[in-house]
Amino acid sequence: MVVSRRRPRGETRREILALAARLLQTRGYHGFSFHHLAEGLGVRTPAVHYHFPTKADLAAAVLRRFRDDFAWWREQPTLRALPAHAQMEAFLDLEARYVAEGKVCPLGMAGVEFASLPPAACREAQALMHELRDWLAARLAAAREQGQCTFAGSAEDTALAVMAAAQGGLQLARLNGADDFAAVRRALRTALGGDPSAP
Amino acid sequence: MVVSRRRPRGETRREILALAARLLQTRGYHGFSFHHLAEGLGVRTPAVHYHFPTKADLAAAVLRRFRDDFAWWREQPTLRALPAHAQMEAFLDLEARYVAEGKVCPLGMAGVEFASLPPAACREAQALMHELRDWLAARLAAAREQGQCTFAGSAEDTALAVMAAAQGGLQLARLNGADDFAAVRRALRTALGGDPSAP
DNA sequence: GTCTATAACGTGATAGAC
DNA sequence: GTCTATCACGTTATAGAC
């Protein structure tokens, strides 16, 4: 016999993670509360605590899910079929979507609030950063080797610069409008020796 | 007759602004309280409220002071005597000092917490961003005209990219160590056509 | 799994003495 | 200018019923 539920099993947990991710990317860790979460989901705060005992648990889980999502995304056949430089553009497309949603990069949030973030959340953010850096550096190195890019300097330095420019660009876009992220992206394309007139 | 004070007139206000700036750049707006300020200054919280009635007032005043400091800095004769590209390097030196102090760029903090920041603070941050962007774009345009840089694309786009990379680099440095800011800076020099082996 | 109720605490802010 | 005392409120978190 099936007991009726307002949501399927595991659905509330997923919705909490999704809303918490959005709040983390728009208001920062200290800028939202369990009340924001509960209100947004149509439940009470203890329901949230049932799924994530503490706010620190929740933040770590959200960042962990960013890592999982990235690991999944980068293994997609449709992505892996693309040339290396197009894979990097696809990553910048992800960031561009954040702009449209008024969000910043989770690594930007973590960087700004690092000193006041729960330790477990810091560790997840650091792991995400390493994974993203290594992936980007590999794409950049391959793109240069295959003549799709012409940047000088090491792929590792360049990967960090691309990450920094992208997350900084998201933040500038919040201060001054989405065009500023587009401007940063144009400058990035120019600097990497690709085609600056691309979308 | 002079009444003795623990601090000279106006000194406490300055110290509050300095400590608040440091806390804003390390913990974010929602990551510090009047208690942090009072404890750090050896006073009680109402003493802070005397100088800045609300936290919103304080945040706006701190960002206003960043604007004033930048306006003063960029007019210094010793800076203005430098070639345009060296002026831009001097700006990156300022950011590098933040790295050593474990701070992020105030514009990064404002970008991340934008949606939960007091309106007056948002306006000051936006004004600072515009002033910095215009100054950087002018230096970059002059540097290219005088053959000190060789970047392609518009000076405005490039200025935004430099700002984004610098503030993103500060945040990455918090996650993974100061070397990452140095790496971003190297990549920046390479991309702008300067000498990447500079300090 | 979600609820009501409540505890325990931190925070922004004010009143009024000194 | 700074203090003590205090307030109102929001926040994280728990207990126990359903």
Image (cartoon, coloured by chain):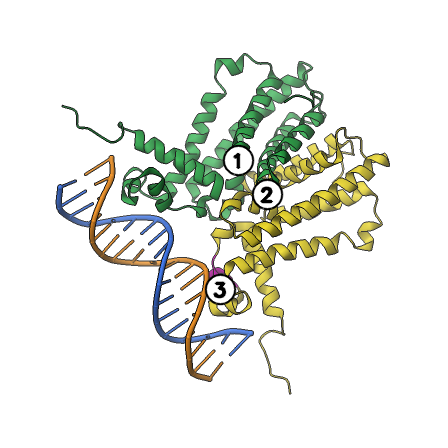
Chain colours: A green, B yellow, C orange, D blue
Q: How many marks?
A: 3
Provide the secondary structure element on which disc 3 rests. helix
Provide the secondary structure element on which disc 2 rests. helix
**Is A130 rendered above or below residue B118?**
above
Q: Amino acid at mark 3?
A: Glu
Q: Which residue is mark 1?
A: A105
- Label 3 packing within 10 angstroms: few (<14), some (14-19), many (20+): few
Cα–Cα gap, marks 1 and 3: 33 Å
- Label 1 packing within 10 angstroms: few (<14), some (14-19), many (20+): many
Q: Amino acid at mark 1?
A: Cys
Given residues A114 and B84, the one toward you in this image is: B84
Labels 1, 3: front one? 1
> Where is residue B48 drawn, in percent x and y?
52, 66
Q: Residue at x 69, y 57 (%)?
A: B68
The reply to whether the C-beta atoms of the residues labelled 2 and 3 are less than 8 Å apart is: no
Asked whether, in this view, residue B60 is left or right of residue B90, the answer is: left
Q: Amino acid at mark 2?
A: Leu
Asked whether, in this view, residue D11 is left or right of residue A143, the answer is: left
The reply to whether the C-beta atoms of the residues labelled 1 and 3 are less than 8 Å apart is: no
Q: Which residue is mark 2?
A: A175
Provide the secondary structure element on which disc 1 rests. loop
Residue B169 is marked as none
**Is B179 rendered above or below residue A143?**
below
> Where is residue A71 drawn, in percent x and y?
46, 23
Q: Where is the N terminus of chain A found, in terms of image quarters?
A: top left
What range of the chain is rendered magenta? B33-40
Q: Which residue is mark 3?
A: B39
Q: Chain of mark 3?
A: B
Cα–Cα gap, marks 1 and 2: 14 Å
